[in-house]
Image (cartoon, grey):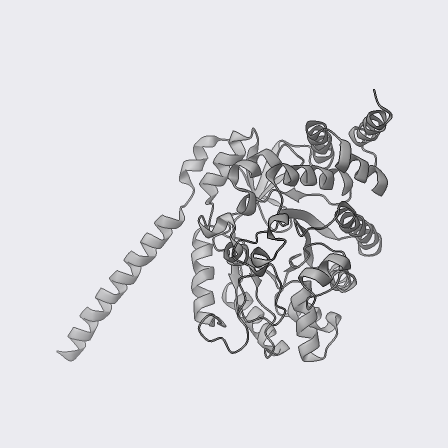
Amino acid sequence: MSEIQQQIDRILARVHDGGRITYDEGTLLYKHADLLDLAEAANARRFQLNPQPFVTYLVDRNINYTNYCITDCQFCNFYALPGDNKKGYVNSKETLGKKIEEALALGATRILMQGGHHPDLPLEYYTDLVGWIHQTYPTIEINAFSPSEIQHISNVSGQSWHSVLSALKAVGLQGLPGGGGEILDDEVRKRVSPKKIMTNDWFGVMKVAHELGLTTTATMVIGFREELRHRMNHLQRLRDEQDDSLARFGSGFNAFISWTVQIENTPLARSRFAQEYGATSTEYLRHTAIARIFLDNLPHISASWPTQGAKVGQVALHFGCDDFGSTMIEENVVSAAGAITGAMPAMEPREIHRQIRAAGFIPVQRNTDYQHLCVYEDPAADEALPSLADIRERAAAQAKALAAAQKIANVTLLN
């Protein structure tokens, strides 16, 4: 047995015993460990943190309030430049309300609302919008914006991150998703998204969110032609920040999710290095396992079926993931870049259950804070779950009946 293999065996044994590994040890595992040995260790870590044979999921909807943006990220095909009235939009409350109502009918407990960096919208626009949603739909959790959006709102309004987040929390904001993380290393960020938030500021905004008690998640996107050290720098910084937030505020990131960059319809696809962008499914699984092993202070890791597909998402449940993500009733950003959600924009609860059960686990619907809302131990209960097609059919029938009744009322009034 080689000396490297002996080192790997000692490191993995420590993981099975619940111990923490170092940056250099993580790098060694990433480079040399057998993929299935990593999966076994990642699963050990998963069951240390989440000992039951449950896989959770969330019923929610991703909603975009605007796609106008001034950051020109090289991996994005979602945004429209200011003045582009053909592609660009700012959704009305009526449009957003219809999306929320459809999500509620499917059993959604949360909306994930994000948008571009609009150059003209003031802080009052965001507080009015969040306040209106909270008052109109009080049962829905509002996770909205991202560290980069908060920084942008702060720049436009001239107010601090703390003031912006405090104002949004006061009107109903409950969580700040970890969007815009990509690779949290400025060597990479300056190359692919130089106008967007840099690493220290991303973590700085999140630190304020933790101080204010907002629910937060952390993300990572691989495949930007980054080196292994960039990936490990991201994971190390994330673990260090989590240690600090837990010590100072008693809370931090409640979950981590990573995926591979989608470049099909983006400027990166036209780059002379296009063939070097992206990552394979095997690379995604290796990265997922390393993340679960290394991030021993983050309680949950979610599989990314929207970018990897349902089957790879299923396999990820045996590489340390304890969550299958969300229904993604609507998703526009990675879809525009060429992700699977462009062809299959939603996975209904019934199908999520099927995928989780096929992987050998019990599906559990959760909320944003990973509280269990319903444990579906009996597979027969899956058949009673609502479908998006049925909801839309009922809504269309109700609209038709309402129009017919209005027509009769108008005729009666005229007579």
Q: Residue at x 63, y 69 (%)?
A: 71
For the residue pair 289 and 109, the one nearer the viewer reads as 289
Q: Going by the image, does 215 lie left or right of 346? A: right
Task: Tell me the quarter of the picture where residue 375 sits.
Answer: top right
Q: Going by the image, does 138 lie left or right of 210? A: left
Residue most toward the left? Answer: 415
Q: Going by the image, does 352 lie left or right of 275? A: left
For the residue pair 330 and 135, the one nearer the viewer reads as 330
Q: Quadrant of the C terminus?
A: bottom left
With respect to residue 78, does 222 lie above or below?
A: above
Q: Residue at x 48, y 55 (%)?
A: 330
For the residue pair 205 and 264, the one nearer the viewer reads as 264
Q: Quadrant of the N terminus?
A: top right
The number of callouts visible is: 0
Q: Going by the image, does 48 lie left or right of 259? A: right
Task: Tell me the quarter of the picture where residue 36 sits.
Answer: top right
Residue 172 percent location from the top left of the image: 61, 66
With respect to residue 412, does 243 lie above or below?
A: above
With respect to residue 327, does 75 lie above or below?
A: below
For the residue pair 335 and 173, the one nearer the viewer reads as 335
Residue most toward the top? Answer: 1
Residue 161 visible in the displayed image: yes
Residue 277 percent location from the top left of the image: 63, 50
Residue 381 percent location from the top left of the image: 45, 35
Residue 22 visible in the displayed image: no
Residue 288 percent location from the top left of the image: 68, 40
